[in-house]
Image (spheres, helix red, strand yellow):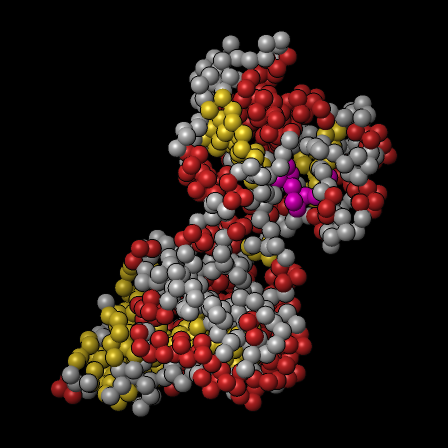
Amino acid sequence: MAFNHKHILGTEYLSREDIQLILDTAESFREINTRSIKKVPTLRGKTIINAFFENSTRTRLSFEIAGKRLSADTVNISGSASSVTKGETLEDTARNIEVMHPDIIVIRHGHSGAPHYLAERLNCSVINAGDGAHEHPSQALLDILTMRQHKGKIDGLKVAIVGDIAHSRVVRSNLYALNKMGADVHLAGPGTMMPSGIERLGATVHYDIRAAVKDADVVMMLRIQLERQGMTLLPTLREYARFFGLNDDVLKLAKADAIVMHPGPMNRGVEISSAVADGPQNVILGQVENGVAVRMALLYLVSGGEQAVE
Amino acid sequence: MKILIKGGRVIDPSRNFDQVADLLIEDGKIAAIETTIDTKAADQVIDATGQLVTPGLIDIHVHLRDPGLEYKEDIVTGTLAAVAGGFTSVACMPNTKPVNDNKAVTQYIINKAKNDGYCNVFPIGAITKGMAGETLSEMGELKEAGCLAVSDDGRPVSDGEVMRRALEYSRPFGITVVSHTEDLSLVGEGVMNDGFVATELGLKGIPWVAEDTMTARDVMLAEFTGGRLHVAHISTKGGVDIVRQAKARGVNVTCEATPHHFTLTDEAVRGYNTDAKMNPPLRSAADVAAICAGLADGTIDAIATDHAPHHIDEKNVEFRIAMNGIVGLETALPLTLELVAAGTIDLPRAVALLSCGPAHALNIPRGTLEIAAPADVTVIDPSLKWTVVREELKSKSRNTPFTGRKMKGAATCTIVGGKIVFSR
């Protein structure tokens, strides 16, 4: 089937079939990542700009490796080094990038909607690598690929997502995608971190981690930003760990074969205990590994996907 | 110079007058309104057959950006936009550079408007020095210089004691205090209405309660002090309820609503549309319904545009950092007529909300067609169809969410002090 998206701005805009195609394509790329020569010529001659206007290590590295393994020329712009700090507008930055004729821009930006803004103004493909509290589509896709590998399917899975729902782009992207794939999504978090109307995106809302985790097939813990401690959203991290952290006792409520996920970076002892993070049910590094394959698939598909993988 | 407006439906809600009649203007004043006036009595005759003849429309909430921010708008372009929209009087907010918190700035605005402007301009002074919310401005001298009201619009007076004293101090001067009601601690970093759309777009929300708690505080302070309060741009159901209850108790309070708040909801923000970003933000459908009910039952006294011109560079950016506000002078009249077409309000009520209602709220000596009153008259073709085209707007800025909207109704002739300042 054909992939008809020039941009990957969010899972909101992807159909179930699109998602399946991305996952299947990623599966076929996974093998390349284990070869001794980890490189195919698929995107030779293509230029990919990784424009990260907000800090990121994992996602940027993952996109960069994905591009390089497909033989594209990848260039990185980071927030502090970019002209943003010199007061240039995003539109001017975009225009300057444009005239260098990149094929794909991968953008991470602190402002929700920034990738949409670029997509409206540029001729090249735009891939959203995280915009504000809006979407982080490649993360949700790698999450779902990981779930599929371990569970064989997504339809009917109970997925619990726990943490700072309000500020999480991972949650929104997962909600759109998981619902399209037929999962039953349950959210839990403190009352201060649950945004208005989130249930309308297809989720059951809990304020008790136990209710969300009970009988779950997948438990996904979100990172708590440490700076939120002492703000009005959260009294202390200690209290957060007690009421919303995942430990062995809470995990026992999930199905015996439940998997534990985390988009990283983890705060051990806060949202997740070390015992769980390193325990037999964790698939956290598998998520990271799948990240490269999913991003290879996205780069390949938005490039037209016409060339065979060798 | 005698102007005769013939055959129009003359609607003057200030006197409950509504019938087809001829209106004669002489020496800048309303000279006569009669069933038939001989065309020989006039130097110029305007055929208003099939049209409405109303008191010149009044907008008590505009930002003319002059002095200091002329790259967005100035008194000339702002008043031209006003008369093109049918307005003959505007009251302009003090958040200029420098702030209009003193006699000199007030006089500058009045003089420039008189010399170069197209309509009457009534400056609104600041409540506090520099709009900093700390020390009261010299309201007595502002009144002397020509300010009828004071406001720190754009910024709430956060300190309750300062607001209390402002209401007490302004009262004997006959000055209205116009309050931008907003609890900044509840607004936080919000950039649009708090609700499902904000959640979906991943944008921080401004909850209705951030507005309502402050509206309630200021209404209570008005009740306590006996001061004269006008609540600016009410956008919530709760705000309408608070004012309705206060009026029932006899509190000396009036309020206004903007066309965008009775026309659009936060759905307009989708696509990160910065032309739908303003403060207060576009709210929910329930809030829109409550504002419409308030316009109909008299709770809301005036329709005011909060005309807020911004340069393209201030809007053509990421949503979170875009400036708040939209231009409104040239779209207010047809949007109000949409309420009439929808049966929300009748035509005389619509005219009242744009003339004697706002005049009463700020004590502006306009908004009536009584004999000998200054001849501010607007002739409106209620069936004229047009489409909003950015480039055709008279305002220096074009930040409007109504681009491309099909409108029905427009001012065909705007007369200020007996002088035709705009016609189409």
Residue B294 horizontal side relative to residue B4, left or right: right
Which residue shows up at 61% across the image and 15% down it? A33
- Quarter that holds the C terminus of chain B: bottom left
Q: Position of residue A95 (x, y in %)?
A: 41, 38
Of residues B266 and A15, the one drawn nearer to the viewer in this rendering = B266
Q: Position of residue B281 (x, y in %)?
A: 53, 59
Residue A294 horizontal side relative to residue B8, left or right: right
Q: Position of residue B413 (x, y in %)?
A: 26, 72
Q: Can you say whether B390 is above or below B215 in the image? A: above
Give the image quarter of residue A295: top right
Residue A80 horizontal side relative to residue B55, left or right: right
Which residue shows up at 21% across the image and 80% down it? B6
Q: Is residue B275 magenta?
A: no
Residue A204 appears in view: yes
Residue farthest along the right direction in this orientation = A249
Residue range highlighted in magenta: A162-176
Residue B77 horizontal side relative to residue B39, left or right: right
Give the image quarter of residue A99: top left
